[in-house]
Amino acid sequence: LSNQDPDSFLTVEERLDLSNLHPGLFGTADAIIYQPNLKTLHVVDYKHGQGIPVDVMDDGKPNVQLMYYGLGALEQTKAPCEFVSLHIVQPRCHHPDGPIRSVKFQAVDMIDFAADLVDYAILTESPSAPLKAGDWCRFCPAAVKCPVVRDRALAISKQEFTPTQVYDPVKLSETLQWLDVVEAFIKNVRAFAYAEAERGRTPPGFKLVEKRANRKWVDESKVGELAKA
């Protein structure tokens, strides 16, 4: 930021309201930086997790979540700019491109993205909206009851790979990519079943038991004194 340019600004944890495009659309950008001299709006998304690296590009296109934040920043700040620069900051997770990954494009590209976003938002409101599974399913609260995730988890669990077996490397790659989703599905199912049992709706064949408490000496020096007594 330039101290000599009064039009430059920095905002942190900025809540973005896109309801003017479609009701219910919102988000939060970790940081928004505007550089009038470069006619550029920067949008930063901080990822604290260390297990799942996030890319700024997906299949040759900017990350959809980042584009969403970029569009929200443009709509909210009304900053006159020619370029939008999107950044992912993920210092705790190794990535071959480093802890900070960026992509820059012309602001007018947001027009097509905004139109697609509205179309998809309307589609989600349809009772017959198609279900599409992907690595995003690991974060979805509805994954525990999603038939697509369930079927994919069952299909993955039937895959067999052994050193003596001829296997398809592509199948192995697809299976590895889905393991995080399957593990998240299993974890969510167990959490859901436990919550149901606590509400008095224990699944048939199971019972709710108290966790075993692990006792610990408050003053370990007294252990020796008692042992000598």
Image (cartoon, helix red, strand yellow):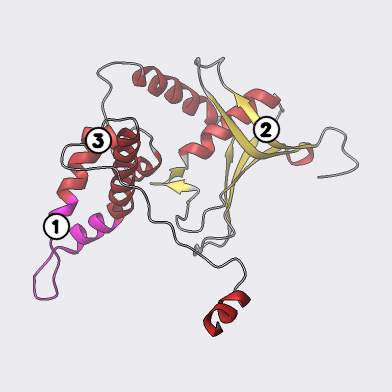
Task: Name the outermost residue toward the left.
Answer: 165
Q: Magenta stretch?
A: 156-176
Kind of residue sitting beneath label 1: Gln
Task: Please tell me whether mark 1 sits on a helix, a strand or a loop.
Answer: loop
Q: Is residue 132 visible?
A: no
- Residue count near mark 2 (Cα–Cα under 10 Å), binned few <14, some 14–19, many ≥20: some
Q: CA distance from mark 1 to mark 3?
A: 31 Å
Image point (62%, 77%), residue name: 221
Query: Which label's residue is closer to the chain start, 3 or 2?
Result: 2
Residue 175 drawn at (x, y percent): 23, 56
Q: Is residue 68 left or right of residue 180?
A: right
* Residue 76 falls left or right of residue 215: right
Residue named by callout 3: 202
Q: Quadrant of the C terminus?
A: bottom right
Q: Nearer the viewer, mark 3 or mark 2?
A: 3
Query: What amino acid is found at the position of numbered circle 3 in the picture?
Result: Thr
- Residue 91 visible? The answer is yes
**Gap in angstroms between the C-alphas marked 2 and 1:** 45 Å
Residue behind mark 1: 159
Asked which secondary structure carries label 2, the reply is strand
The answer to whether residue 175 is magenta is: yes
Q: Position of residue 82 (x, y in %)?
A: 66, 34
Q: Which residue lies under the disc numbered 2?
A: 14
Q: In front: 174, or 180?
A: 180
